[in-house]
Amino acid sequence: MSVGFSPIVRRRRLGAEIRRLREHEKLTLTQLGGLVGWSAAKLSRLENARIRPDVGDVMDVLDALGVTGARQDALIALARDAANSRGWWTAYGSDIFDRQQPYAEFENGAVRIREYQLTHVPGLLQTRAYAAARFASRPSIGLSPVDIDAAAEARLARQCVLTRDAPLSYDALLDESALVRRYGSEGVRAEQCGHLVEMAELPNITIRILPYDARIGDGYLPRCSFSLYRFADPVDPEIAVLETETSDIHIGDGEDVNRYKLVFDQMWAAAFSSEDSIKLLTAARDNPDEEF
């Protein structure tokens, strides 16, 4: 597996370009929609990357906006990437459910990921047993159940980006609470901590633990877990993804992304060193019944 591109990021780029062209022509969503026979709602979904675009539809929009020549060719090529549905994740069908697929698409085109997890081990570093325990807990808060084995298999398949021909750089920052929380039967945490120790031996992966008593800059703490993605194509914008209980929020505005980068940098500097973090994980692996 080699570095690809992220269809979801290309959809965001395409939508932003169409919005800029529409605003340049001083057209409202309703006005442009009328020119191509669309509702304003459908055009809004295209501009906000909420639908996988049809290349023919995009060509109609570009014609209505008077876009021709090389500019048109470039945007049609972008639309083809944005419409791509042939990623490895499609082989899993509905087993890679709605919240996993966007992560798979982001990871496919990423060259660097920095991730902060407040309450659990990041998906890219989970063992099968840990992932299965996470999926099994969904119905307890009213989320629809999933095929646990298939969903865990899809999660492990996502982890190939860490060992592909050109592996991405991955910095994982785990709050101490992510290690204290217990998922699944006895032994799951010990196995998971051992897996973290093994993964930290890879040259492209750095793991740090943020202790409860860490002194973080001026004391600012984020409200939720989040991930930062940088992509192989320098034209693709950096993305921040925030996790909530029921959905994930994708942020592409440069100023907002930079704010999350600053938050991450402050916590990273306050965390245990990678060496001390591995010592802590090793102790948790070897003495699973002891508290940290």
Image (tube, rainbow, N blue to C red):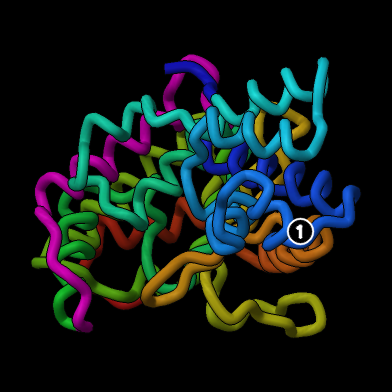
| Pick the front one: 106 or 32 | 32
Could you say which quadrant of the image residue 81 lies in?
Answer: top right
Does residue 272 show up? no
Q: Would residue 215 be counted in the magenta stretch?
A: no
Image check: 72 left or right of 97? right
Image check: 164 left or right of 48? left
- Determine which residue is flagged by label 1: 253
Residue 76 coordinates in the image, percent (x, y):
65, 24
Q: Quadrant of the C terminus?
A: bottom left
Element class at badge 1? loop
- Residue found 30% across the figure and 75% down from its top: 181
- Residue found 85% across the figure and 54% down from its top: 23
- Residue found 73% across the figure and 44% down from its top: 18
Q: How many marks?
A: 1
| Pick the front one: 50 or 119 | 50
- Residue found 41% across the figure and 41% down from its top: 104
Above or below, comparing residue 36 to residue 265 in the picture = above
Does residue 198 show up? yes
Image check: 148 left or right of 279? left
Q: Counting other residues with Cα less than 10 Å from the Cα at mark 1, is it few (<14), some (14-19), or many (20 or more)? A: few
Above or below, comparing residue 283 to residue 127 in the picture = below
| Pick the front one: 120 or 291 | 120
State the extent of the magenta-drawn residues as a range: 141-168
Above or below, comparing residue 88 to residue 39 in the picture = above
Above or below, comparing residue 15 to residue 283 in the picture = above
Q: Amino acid at mark 1?
A: Asp
Could you say which quadrant of the image residue 66 lies in?
Answer: top right
Q: Quadrant of the N terminus?
A: top left
Residue 4 coordinates in the image, percent (x, y):
53, 23
Residue 114 coordinates in the image, percent (x, y):
60, 50
Q: Would residue 162 be counted in the magenta stretch?
A: yes
